[in-house]
Amino acid sequence: MAELELEQLEAARPRSMHLEWTFPLLFRPASTLKRVSEQERGVWIAPLLIISILAIMVVLITAPARKIQVQSSIETPQDFQYWPPEMQQEYMDNQANKSNTLFIYIFPAAGAAAGVWITWFLLGSILHLGLTLTGSRGSNTSALNLVGWAALPLALRYAVQAVAALSTKQLIASPALSGFIAADATGFMVFLRGVLSQIDIYFIWMVILLLVGVLPMTGLTRSKAWGAVLVSVLIIVALKALPAFIGGQLSGLSTSSFF
């Protein structure tokens, strides 16, 4: 009797962690996403934890190759031989610090995990805004739930990258479709390279899951719901490509260009 009451209590108490939905989402996405859309509280923790752990794993596996790359890229500035010994030593110490544990392991791992959560929150919030403008009365929590679970294919992307890094012992130079743009591209091509670096089969899989899950969540017509999803995804892709583009523009500036 006590066990029955405990089971009923657990069934009545909503949970935020649903690891048991992981494999059904990959093989039965429509029914699983419909179940996700029925939740009134946040159930995004499980997929985001899985994605974050695998993203950190890729960082840790590629850390040795990244350290070698940083050390091999150290160059002495012009007229370095004429600097005072104290300045030379300070410069070399600063360059050596770029290959220590903090910059090779901790900061990249924290950045990878933060990127997962920030991207999820921004995409969920933008999607909620887009759906609201098209007539949906769904909550922001529902949009965040959908984005969290629809992003689960990205965990497979990180898993594949981890296996590739383990087997080759090298960094992935041109992820996704960015290989179609030269690494030394300038101007708008830098932005386009950043956009293409995000588009692969796992990204397309995520978008398809969003398109499948948004219909039962909102009750909107297919054109309105799908339009909101596609616009939201395009905005996020553009936002994620902007830092590389801005960095490329700033690196091309010279002191004389200000005068």
Image (cartoon, helix red, strand yellow):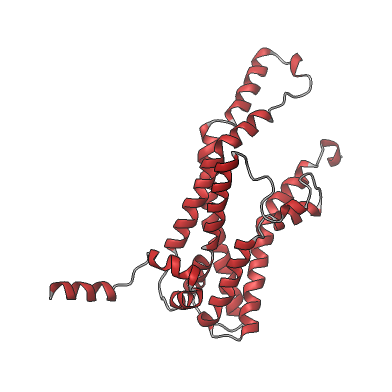
Q: Is residue 110 visible?
A: no
Quadrant of the rendering where the C terminus is positioned: top right
Residue 205: x %, y % from top left: 59, 67
Quadrant of the rendering where the N terminus is positioned: bottom left
Residue 256 falls in image quadrant: top right
Q: Is residue 157 left or right of residue 75?
A: left
Residue that appears at 74% across and 19% down: 80
Residue that appears at 43% across and 77% down: 35
Q: Is residue 101 above or below residue 226?
A: above
Residue 78: x %, y % from top left: 78, 23
Q: Nearer the viewer, residue 28 or 224?
A: 28
Residue 64: x %, y % from top left: 56, 35
Residue that appears at 73% across and 50% down: 246
Residue that appears at 85% across and 41% down: 257
Q: Is residue 87 above or below residue 183?
A: above
Q: Is residue 232 left or right of residue 23?
A: right
Residue closest to the far left? 1
Q: Nearer the viewer, residue 143 or 148?
A: 148
Q: Nearer the viewer, residue 27 or 34?
A: 27
